Image (cartoon, helix red, strand yellow):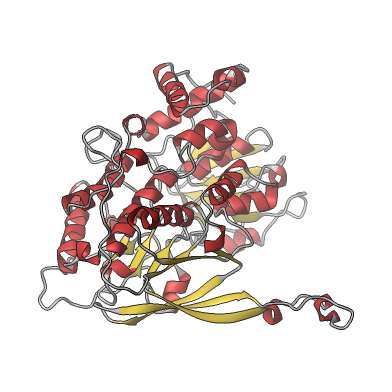
Amino acid sequence: MLLGLASALPALINCFLPWQHPFGVPGQSDCLHFQARETSSTPKRIAVVGAGTAGLSFLKVSQEYQREHNVNWEVVLYEQRYDIGGVWYAVSFLQGLHPMCQYHKDLVAHYNLTELIHLRHNVTVARWLGNVSHGHWELTIQKPRKIPSVTPQNPTRYRRWNPEHELETIYQKFDYLIVATGHNRYPHVDNFPGKGDWLSNSDPKSQFRRDIRHSMYFMGPQPYINRTVLIVGGGFSGMDIGNHLTPFVSKAYIARSAETTGDPSNHFLIPKPRLSHFDRDAIYFEDGSSVTDVDSVILATGYLYIIPFLSAGDALTVDPNAKSRNTSHIHPPPPLPLTSNGKYIRPLYKHTMSLSSYFPPSSLFVLGLQSGTPPALTDAAQAIFATRVIADPSLVAGRILLLRELEEEEERLRRAGYDPDKQGHSPVDFDGRGKASSNFMDGLIDFLKRRNVTGLPLPGSGGRYVEDWRRRHDNFPGLIRMFFTWREIEKRGEGGKMVAGRRTEEDWIELLDYLVAHPLPPTPI
């Protein structure tokens, strides 16, 4: 998400990207009722890892499902940090409570989810004990050790805190595992040649020492005041950081691919081709040009799609050279481990459910890998999919058939000129209508509809999951234009007047439609 958009228009984003009603399933009142197909008297045990948007979405959806269908599951969420909120907790930790972090807190309180969440519980290993047809997950978890009360007779609580002494390791067994740790945690840093030589050769006469940081650690312009900065990457983060920095820095370059246009209103950013390499004195680009005046480099180069606790339990192999290949036609089927090349975790059916040959398809779900989609609505669609499959694993019987469908989707990407191993989990707009994220979400629910699952939220026309107004605005170029239009409105001091009195979802939809229908050209910032 663009930080500028979130800060400039929090109420609008609260409506458009997540949901106005905290993580509410659209059209819940219109759902048809059906009886869950439980196959055992023993409650299903489900572990959720991560208390950000994805993890909390699953908690809410699964709790509603149990209540509405009279089933009882044991659902436990483990969060490594001291509080909920995911990436918004990290922002709040450094800058004070962010409205989006408060939004997550309100969700938990409103839907009585607190007792399901275990904070400061770090899942270090997730290991599948069994085979492709049955078994269970064993989780290794580090948690705070219970500390005795402080009394004059027991003063040990006053000793210096030592993490090794204050933590204990526990082991828990679960039938199903929901990985909801997101994709913005492990920075992807290209190993550009000569980087170390450049860093070690700061000009002794300059007041600045050279530095290179990933955009994950960008928390504002303060460290870069009066510096010359190179931003590497022209995506969401690079563009947003450029807009934050330009009023404060001496000069700013942005290195990006030719097809990335950036922010047309920011004429202060000096575009450069993709970064090639460093030497002691200069930074070089792919067209052979170079710059020698840069003090700081910010790498807006994305994140690695890895899940360390799965790798620690041999459930996920990390191989930067891994390539997708078709194996569904081979008999007998070859072993197919869950693998990540850093950009693409495979095989995941609909980017959500594991098709590894080492554990059942219904046993592992990974939520929140998609980029460029509305987070809460997408996470809820995945949670609905996972919840129904957990309730009735026969829905995904036939792993090879599902694998063949995944391979056909990868072939479709190749025919369109994309490499699935590089495209990863970003949706592709095949038909040019700008509805890729809506199609992805509808596809998850359509899978269930084709298998005669009822009781699904279908508020969109034609029995679709995505509401019409959301589908209408599912267009990233249109969202960017909306962002620029709103920024111009705020420059004119008219933003407060336009949002005053808006309370209902219809009020906010009207504002979105107005912004799209009355675009304002961006002016220099």
Q: Residue at x 25, y 77 (%)?
A: 132
Count of all numbered marks drawn on residues in the image? 0
Q: Residue at x 11, y 73 (%)?
A: 330
Above or below, 101 relative to 183: above
Furthest-front residue in this view: 70
Q: Let me know if residue 322 appears in the view.
A: no
**Closest to the observer: 415 or 37?**
37
Above or below, 80 relative to 155: above
Above or below, 336 relative to 267: below
- Horizontal side of residue 74 vs 10, given as left or right: left
Furthest-right residue in this view: 152
Query: Residue 379, position in %: x, y?
Result: 40, 50
- Horizontal side of residue 478 vs 111, given as left or right: left
- The quadrant in which residue 102 appears is top right
- The quadrant in which residue 158 appears is bottom right
**Closest to the observer: 261 or 185?**
185
**Closest to the observer: 292 or 116?**
116
Q: Residue at x 75, y 49 (%)?
A: 206
Query: Residue 345, position in %: x, y?
Result: 34, 63
- Horizontal side of residue 243 vs 208, given as left or right: left
**Closest to the observer: 416 or 209?**
416
The C terminus sits in image quarter: top right
Q: Residue at x 31, y 46 (%)?
A: 441
Above or below, 238 relative to 405: above
- The quadrant in which residue 331 appears is bottom left
